[in-house]
Image: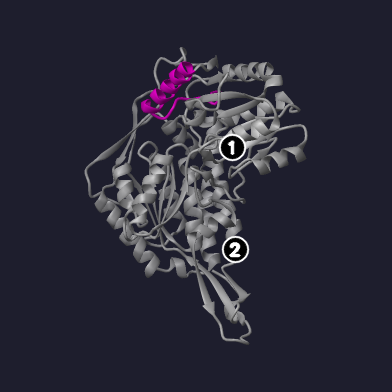
């Protein structure tokens, strides 16, 4: 994307309207360090307008009162538009955050379409009403939409995380305000076009690009019934604190320091091929990235050599070049953070096996070489803190109890994988690791199952019926003894 993209309006309640503030967000290419876009910076008054529109849409409008099939029809049009415009969406996001385009097609665009599609599948069979035998008589248990949802998304996978929140919220019958990151607001305007064309009723969706201060105002707004947030642990704690003032319900999808366990019987070539794309995915800027690789001491040298060679072979360059495998970090602050951690790792005594600085091939842009540290102890900061950059730790272990202990010795618990010749044994290992999502001899994130974390990795779940259920309140209706169910309470949205 070479031309300057400018948007002068905000998408509030389904319409493009003039912003009430005068601030502007400049979007800077992480590859060229040049401004590639400008959008309005939403202010608190814009938040008030969006919340008021969402409140009216939920309290008085048709959306939550529509039949489920009608809402599914609208959401299906959104999903189909993502499928039709996936190349455009991938290019826009790559230009904003540096994701290599070839990866962006799936990770940024088609994966978002898959989230919308999976949510539709879940919505069709979800138990909106069910009969139960209570202790004192028959019960009718209803699940009713929670209300106005504030969806706050990060810059690393903006449309994927937006879909993870908006798809279940809209299908449930909620109205929503999407707060887009100031680093990646351009793709949000593509979503606004898609939503408008899909036929969402007035007020159901607003999209506001803004910074943390305005995000905090939205999260603490008394007109919001639920907050769904993806971001850092520190920001998640602040979201929870601010939302608690109104007892607003929250779902938090936070950071990770996930471990890939290579067992002694693993095929090393398979493990390297399977781990490397998900260790350095999105240039290392992914919460689920496999950033700790645990290798048996008996095979440590060959494992170190194999991963170092794979890291060194990654092609660094322009994220819009289809041949690029590792692009720039999203901002100069992220580049500086990764370089700082590389120095910290060296000071702690870890050994750089590959990378370790800025690539000489790139005269400008916020690049950091894919860096692999060896001889890492799990107590080191580089093994314990989420770097959110292309810096990976190779940690040796002795026996199986030790590898499980190291995997679990973390403040995080979001993802992970195990690599072994014995799949059943791998499943046993998976049961022992305290993390929300796990893979055996692969790495996957299935949108029909629950995604979320243990410990500091978050609260609640996204995807699957568990994630869909986060957008409902539960109501218990007591029925008179001897009452027999009729057609009116057989279910439905």
Q: Residue at position x 30%, y 53% from top?
A: 47
Magenta span dominant secondary structure: helix
Q: Which residue is mark 2?
A: 126
Q: Which residue is mark 1?
A: 408
Coordinates of residue 243 in the picture (x, y in percent) = 36, 54
With 438 as the anchor, is 355 left or right in this view? Answer: left
Helix, strand or loop status at disc 2: loop
Q: Quadrant of the N terminus?
A: top left
Verify whether residue 439 appears in magenta: no
Q: Is residue 325 visible?
A: no
Q: Does residue 490 lie above or below 162 as drawn?
A: below
Coordinates of residue 314 in the picture (x, y in percent) = 57, 20
Q: Does residue 325 lie above or below 51 as drawn?
A: above
Discs 2, 1 touching: Cβ within 8 Å: no
Q: Nearer the viewer, residue 399 or 315?
A: 399
For the residues labelled 2 and 1, the Cα–Cα distance comes to: 34 Å
Q: Residue at position x 41%, y 30% from top?
A: 330
Q: Which residues are magenta?
A: 322-348
Q: Which mark is residue 356?
A: none
With 266 as the anchor, is 318 left or right in this view? Answer: left
Q: Quadrant of the C terminus?
A: bottom right
């Amino acid at each position: 994307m070479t031309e300057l993209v400018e948007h002068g309006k905000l998408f509030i309640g389904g319409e493009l309207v003039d912003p009430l503030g005068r601030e502007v967000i400049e979007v800077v290419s992480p590859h060229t360090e040049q401004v590639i876009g400008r959008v309005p910076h939403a202010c608190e008054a814009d938040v008030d307008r969006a919340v008021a529109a969402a409140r009216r849409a939920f309290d008085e409008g048709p959306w939550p009162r529509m039949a489920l099939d009608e809402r599914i029809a609208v959401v299906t049009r959104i999903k189909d538009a993502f499928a039709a415009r996936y190349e455009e969406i991938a290019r826009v996001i790559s230009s904003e955050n540096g994701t290599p385009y070839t990866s962006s097609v799936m990770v940024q665009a088609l994966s978002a379409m898959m989230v919308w599609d999976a949510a539709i599948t879940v919505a069709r069979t979800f138990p909106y009403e069910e009969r139960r035998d209570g202790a004192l008589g028959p019960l009718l248990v209803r699940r009713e939409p929670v209300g106005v949802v504030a969806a706050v998304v990060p810059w690393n996978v903006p449309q994927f995380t937006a879909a993870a929140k908006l798809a279940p919220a809209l299908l449930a019958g909620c109205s929503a305000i999407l707060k887009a990151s100031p680093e990646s607001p351009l793709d949000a305007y593509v979503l606004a076009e898609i939503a408008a064309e899909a036929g969402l009723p007035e007020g159901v969706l607003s999209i506001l690009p803004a910074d943390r201060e305005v995000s905090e105002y939205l999260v603490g707004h008394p007109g919001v019934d639920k907050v769904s947030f993806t971001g850092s642990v520190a920001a998640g704690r602040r979201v929870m604190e601010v939302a608690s003032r109104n007892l607003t319900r929250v779902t938090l999808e936070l950071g990770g320091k996930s471990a890939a366990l290579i067992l002694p019987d693993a095929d090393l070539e398979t493990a390297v091929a399977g781990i490397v794309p998900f260790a350095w995915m999105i240039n290392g800027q992914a919460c689920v990235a496999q950033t700790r690789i645990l290798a048996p001491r008996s095979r440590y040298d060959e494992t170190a050599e194999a991963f170092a060679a794979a890291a060194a072979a990654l092609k660094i360059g322009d994220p819009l070049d289809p041949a690029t495998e590792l692009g720039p970090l999203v901002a100069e602050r992220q580049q500086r953070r990764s370089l700082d951690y590389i120095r910290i790792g060296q000071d702690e005594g870890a050994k750089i096996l590959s990378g370790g600085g800025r690539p000489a091939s790139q005269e400008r842009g916020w690049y950091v070489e894919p860096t692999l540290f060896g001889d890492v102890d799990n107590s080191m900061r580089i093994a314990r803190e989420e770097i959110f950059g292309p810096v990976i730790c190779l940690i040796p272990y002795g026996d199986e109890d030790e590898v499980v202990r190291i995997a679990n010795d973390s403040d995080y618990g979001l993802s992970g994988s195990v690599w072994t010749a014995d799949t059943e044994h791998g499943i046993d290992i998976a049961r022992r690791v305290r993390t929300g999502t796990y893979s055996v001899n692969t790495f996957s994130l299935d949108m029909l199952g629950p995604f979320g974390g243990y410990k500091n990795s978050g609260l609640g779940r996204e995807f699957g019926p568990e994630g869909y259920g986060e957008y409902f309140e539960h109501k218990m209706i007591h029925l008179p003894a001897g009452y027999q169910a009729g057609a009116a309470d057989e279910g439905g949205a």
